Image (tube, coloured by chain):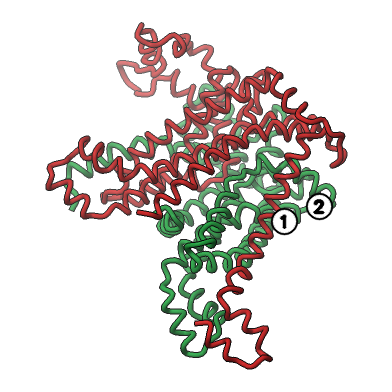
Chain colours: A red, B green
Amino acid sequence: MATVARAGPSARRWQDVFEERRFLGPLLIAPAVLFILLLVGAPLALAIYLSLTDATAGGLSGDWVGLKNYTEAWDDPNFRRALRNTVIFTLVSQAIVLVGAGFLAHALVRDFRGKWFFRFLVILPWATPVALSTVAFLWIFHPLYSVANWTLTHDVVPGSPAFYPYKAINWAFARDFWPSWIQISPIEPIDPPQWLGEPNLAMAAIIFAHAWRILPFATVIFIAGLASMPPEVEDAAKIDGATGLKKFWYVTLPLQLPIALVALLFGIVFTATDMTVVYILTHGGPFNSTHMLTTWAFDTGINSAALGQGAAISLYLLPALAIVAILMLRFARKAEVT
Amino acid sequence: MTSRRESLMSYLIVGPFAIVLAFPFYWMLMTALRADNDLYDIEQVPFKFNADSPTGANFRFLFEQTDYDKWLVNTAIVGAAVVLITLVVALPAGYALARLSGGWGQSVGVGIFLTYLVPPTLLFLPLSRVIAELNLHDRLWSLILVYPSFTVPFSIWLLMGFFKTIPPELEDAALVDGASRLSALARVVFPLSVPGILTVVIFSFSLVVNEFVYAITFISSTEAKTVSAGVPTELIRGDVFYWGALMAATLIPAIPLALLYNVFLNRFIAGFTGGAFR
């Protein structure tokens, strides 16, 4: 193709550059690569440098302290708690999201009346800016005017016999078969649960709010995966008599695994590195019990102005991200071969 | 095509999920329309309007007593500027990477995509220093400069997927007709990818509206905030909450964004998965 251009006179040499694939490609990509190196690569390098110094918010330069920031962070019980919280937060919310998205996508990929309206409702949490929807959860879990608590402690089905949801929950949790770590004290209508004021409940609230907003995204990716399944597979499964659970286990699941893993890897990254939900909902409280690595780094680096220390804390996330990146690369390559 | 039993199953699964996922929005609306004497009364049934409700007072308060309108304008300015920068940088790159698939083009594409995984929470500390050194603190320019760092990788990825669906033969035909490669690009390829480009615009813009970490780190003056940073930091002050106004503030950006998402959802899926995972 480029030979057409090469035949031109020497005055058109500059133009030739734009015709030649060899030059045009890199030329078109260069600005993007430059931009990314400057705004992602350089700050990342700077973060690693800062984490090795005792820099404060006052200036970029600090004295070289080696790995002291990392070891100091590690020895801090608040950091340990934040690390543990980040792992729990990520694993539990992703488990909820995967199961939920699996069910939802299977139901939404079929045609039924009013599907677009249901899809609209399901997409809502994803379309709303996180900071704003988290403010809504702040209100839903309000210590005094919580609608969740109102519903729990009021007769929700007017008329007799009175039905109070909290009584049902108390009855269910009074059974013996629950493992000890899940047992909760009975709910008293006079002193309803303080969703954001008690460490375990606050973690549960954070996980719920986050799973709530990631679920639509995972569902959308799952729907994409299901929609891309060739119809011949469906027919073949039908002929072989695979239906219901059997079909799901032997046909759908193996075919959907790659895309489910992509959704999972994305979810892990978005969750482990998320700061917004925790920052707004509890700001690490009560008593630093719900800090994540991200909020702890923010409090240390910005609010306490210990830039180097903060950078070290957030960089503890890097190994996890690197693992996810490597897995993604392997999947991208595998998906291409097939 | 779908049997009655199957659609009943769909309703039974989707219904409960839809209720949980959409309930906060119902609740935002109910709260936004409430008068204070109704809102802050534990004895009232919160699912129906009592006392002076429903009222538009919260919306009036939001626009007359707070800087909410300024935050909306700021968000729109930053969003428009970032989308523009993103398109200028990502369109050529996305096109080139789509055509150079195989060999190093593919590696660069995946490499760019991976930078999307490097989160703001890892970069905001060093960047806060850089912004301070550049004297951009408290200025919208700081956000306009930094936001493309996540919109560009994301957009290149989507655009790569879209451009791959346009057969290269179309450009070759234009080249044979004597068009230069760049004009073939401008006259043949870009018009065909308008839906894809629009999708990128919508989702880049929504990433900007969503961003919170940089916004609260770089901007501290009330007038220069974006919606995402302004609402949680300025409308929540100690123990004084304006819950009615707060819920109105969350609802106003959510509804148009949700409608746009729904319109462009199918294209988003096509671009997102078309990149390499298929």
Query: Which residue is at a point 46% across and 88% down the rendered structure image?
Result: B176
Q: Earlier in the sequence, mark 1 or mark 2?
A: 2
Q: Where residue B207 appears, x then y in whole percent? A: 58, 51
Disc 1/disc 2 C-alpha distance (Å): 10 Å
Q: Where residue A173 appears, x then y in whole percent? A: 39, 11
Q: Where residue B36 appears, x then y in whole percent? A: 60, 33
Residue A40 visible in the shown view: yes
Q: Mark 2 lies on which chain?
A: B
The residue lying toward the viewer, choosing from B190 and A116, is: B190
Query: Given the image, on which type of amino acid does mark 1 rest?
Result: Leu
Question: Does B189 appear above or below B214?
Answer: below
Q: Where residue A42 appears, x then y in whole percent? A: 73, 50
Q: Which residue lies furthest to the bottom in this view?
A: A9
Q: Is mark 1 on a helix, strand or loop?
A: helix
The residue lying toward the viewer, choosing from A212 and A272, is: A272
Q: Are marks 1 and 2 in contact (CB under 8 Å)?
A: yes
Q: Name the residue under label 2.
A: B136
Numbered circle sitting on residue B145 = 1
| Pointer 2 local density, CA inside 10 Å: few below 14, some 14–19, many at least 20 | some
Question: Does B30 appear above or below B102?
Answer: above
Q: In this view, does A177 lie to the left or right of A41?
A: left
Residue A157 occupies which quadrant of the picture? Answer: top left
Q: In which quarter of the image is the C terminus of chain B?
A: bottom left
Q: Mark 1 lies on which chain?
A: B
Question: Does A186 appear above or below A81?
Answer: above
The residue lying toward the viewer, choosing from B82 and B276, is: B276
Q: In this view, does A134 lie to the left or right of A42?
A: left
Q: Is residue B214 left or right of residue B20?
A: right
Query: Which residue is at a point 64% across and 57% down the rendered structure image?
Result: B79
Question: Does B164 appear above or below B133?
Answer: below
Residue B230 visible in the shown view: no
Query: Given the image, on which type of amino acid does mark 2 rest?
Result: Leu
